Image (tube, helix red, strand yellow):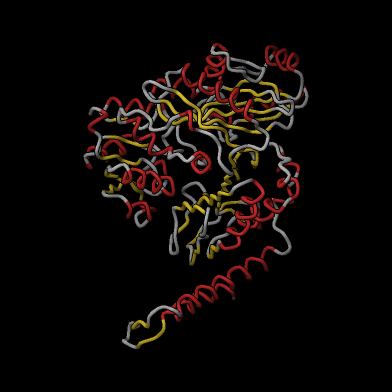
Amino acid sequence: MTPENVRRVLVANRGEIALRIIRACHDEGLEAVAVYSDADRHAPFVRAADHAVHIGGSPAAESYLVIDRVLDAARESGAHAIHPGYGFLSERAAFARAVEDAGLVFVGPPSAAIAAMGDKTSARRLMEAAGVPIVPGATAPMIAGTAALELAGSLGYPVLVKAAAGGGGKGMRVVHAADELSDAIASASSEAMKSFGDDAVYLEKFIERPRHVEIQVLADHERTIHVGERECSVQRRHQKLLEEAPSIAVNDALRERMGAAAVAAAQAVGYRGAGTCEFLLARDGSFYFLEMNTRIQVEHPVTEEVYGVDLVREQLRIARGMPMSIDPATLAPRGWAIECRITSEDPANGLLPSAGAIRWMRAPSGPGVRWESGVESGSEVTLFYDSMLAKLIVRGTDRLRTIEAARRALDELVVVGVATNVAFHRRLLADPDFVAGDIDIQFLARRPDLLAIGPDDDAVQRLVVAAALLEDARRSLRRPVVADADGDARPSAWRAAARRDALR
């Protein structure tokens, strides 16, 4: 299949990102194919697609992670290309290579680029050769022993043990003293093997209180550009919870230096499509390459809102052999955007995932509010997949106004049936340190109070639900009279009565 002949795209993912890609396909005049597991049979993204193919059981290991089943679905549906989304198979070089070998178009970088950036130690060597600043440390896997102790001593404690493959905070340990090093390497190596099937780890200097700032890149067959930065410092155990663009810590000059480094990184591996270079930004303004995510990011909407681009459509254009539609001369941040990741995590139970049916959900709306969700009222939230339910993206003219708008949107959001982290986002956006921009990647580690359940959380949630029910009833009263199942004519507002048990 030649790229220019692509007319039908299979989306090898689920939830909100699958729905996002399906919509972008339709905007580009392409047909979209969904693949789904047993658990996702009735999911919104399946209904939104032009075609849908069942690929297996509810566990991802029986469906979304099985390369042969995804490829069989592409053949069965007549798809010409495969978009991997994020997570699952998106950064597996073997999957991209299998798509290429099957004669299909992979909506992403070449498999060689994924492989080059997939191993952190080889990526560090490539970046060092390309002149991209890296955190001081090893450029090859290490094992416990004299060499590890000598390197750690030369770097100076604390040091960080990191898995050479994978990400998401798996296989990472901070070491504060020499007598902790051997156990930390063994522990990180074991976790890395369980998470990524690769036990290789390496050492680097632990940077105290840096910001996590990432640069969005786009590359077609002739040009590589950057589309500004995102601030991703609000993290819990290396998992991002809130992102914003631009970063309060980045001025125009620093943006250009970091952007140039990201472009050099992408060019060093022959990158194509959308990708992200992640950097640690130290308090003195120096920055260091962390890794490159060879896919679309969860937080891409904040860049889209601030720069006025559609990154997923650009991915589709580039994969089809077309030049990107963006003129870099016109790129400049306008306004501010914040993304809150809404997850089904229970603050009353140590933020463990919460499962069950969403009995009712009301999404926020209004000027500058963007809601991207893979669930709806009636959806079943399971423990088979990631706990993220939706993304709330809010855009404003500046950071303070955007924070205010995000707080208002969170007050409109109602989810009944599963526990969520909405109360955390409300507390975070009201916190003086966050509002002042005084954050770094250890911010939440120092502020566990923001993550813990508050004494007023339950009362606030009950008030929010009550207000939402009242608003819903008022709107329904203005609707035409309808006939119920037995033929009696009643105002449609009575439908809200069934929801009131949420308050009991």
Residue 38 relative to residue 284: left or right = left
- At horizontal 64% and vertical 51% (from top left) the residue drawn is 401
**Quarter of the image with the C terminus in it:** bottom right
Outermost residue to the front: 330
- At horizontal 56% and vertical 35% (from top left) the residue drawn is 168
Which residue is nearer to you in this view: 80 or 350?
80
User: Is residue 196 at all visible to an observer of this figure?
Assistant: no
Q: Quadrant of residue 323?
A: top left
Q: Position of residue 458 (x, y in %)?
A: 66, 66
Residue 401 relative to residue 379: left or right = right
Outermost residue to the bottom: 488
Q: Position of residue 173 (x, y in %)?
A: 67, 30
Which residue is nearer to you in this view: 324 or 132?
324
Which residue is nearer to you in this view: 222 or 116?
222
Residue 120 relative to residue 59: left or right = right
Across the whole image, how many numbered discs are drawn on residues? 0
Which residue is nearer to you in this view: 326 or 268?
326
User: Is residue 23 at all visible to an observer of this figure?
Assistant: yes
Q: Position of residue 204 (x, y in %)?
A: 66, 21
Q: Position of residue 34 (x, y in %)?
A: 32, 46
Q: Quadrant of residue 469?
A: bottom right
In the displayed structure, 197 sits above or below 137; it is below
In the displayed structure, 377 sits above or below 247; it is below
**Quarter of the image with the N terminus in it:** top left
Residue 215 relative to residue 86: left or right = right
